[in-house]
């Protein structure tokens, strides 16, 4: 099963099938975070929808860091 990971630092998205420890090849962060986004939904999204998802994810998770 394909899983979608996101980098909490730069927002880069990566699809993996078996790995649990996923690193970001864009910024070098050693631990990406698993999203709740299903592969089928992600594959049907447009580039704008994907960017909107990243922006919302980063906003929500970075806002919660200060609390």
Image (cartoon, helix red, strand yellow):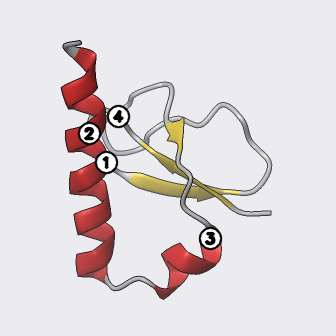
Q: Residue 35 at x, y = what percent?
A: 53, 48
| Gap in angstroms between the C-alphas marked 4 and 1 | 9 Å
28 vs 55, left or right, is right
Mark 1 highlights which residue?
A: 57
**Mark sitting on residue 60:** 2
Label pair 2/1, CB-CB below 8 angstroms? yes
- Please say if the residues under marks 4 and 1 sit with CB atoms less than 8 Å apart: no
| Residue 20 visible in image | yes
Q: Classify mark 3: helix, strand or loop.
A: helix
Q: Relative to residue 10, is residue 22 drawn left or right?
A: right
Is residue 64 shown left or right of residue 25? left
Camera-near label (4 vs 1) is 1
Q: Disc 4 or 2, which lies upstream in sequence? A: 4
Residue 65 sits above or below residue 32 on the image: above
Residue 39 bears which disc, if any?
3
Query: Looking at the image, is mark 4 or mark 1 earlier in the sequence?
Result: 4
Q: Identify which residue is drawn at 71% across, 63% down.
A: 2
Indicate which disc, 4 or 3, sits on the residue closer to the N terminus.
4
- The residue wearing badge 4 is 8
Q: Quadrant of the C terminus?
A: top left
Disc 2 versus disc 3: distance between alpha carbons? 21 Å
Q: CA distance from mark 2 to mark 1?
A: 5 Å
Please, what secondary structure does the residue beneath circle 2 have? helix
């Amino acid at each position: 099963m394909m899983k979608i990971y996101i980098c909490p630092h730069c927002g880069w998205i990566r699809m993996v099938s078996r790995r649990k420890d996923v690193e970001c090849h864009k910024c070098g962060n050693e631990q990406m975070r698993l999203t709740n986004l299903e592969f089928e939904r992600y594959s049907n999204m447009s580039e704008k929808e994907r960017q909107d998802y990243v922006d919302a994810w980063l906003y929500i998770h970075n806002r919660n860091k200060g609390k």
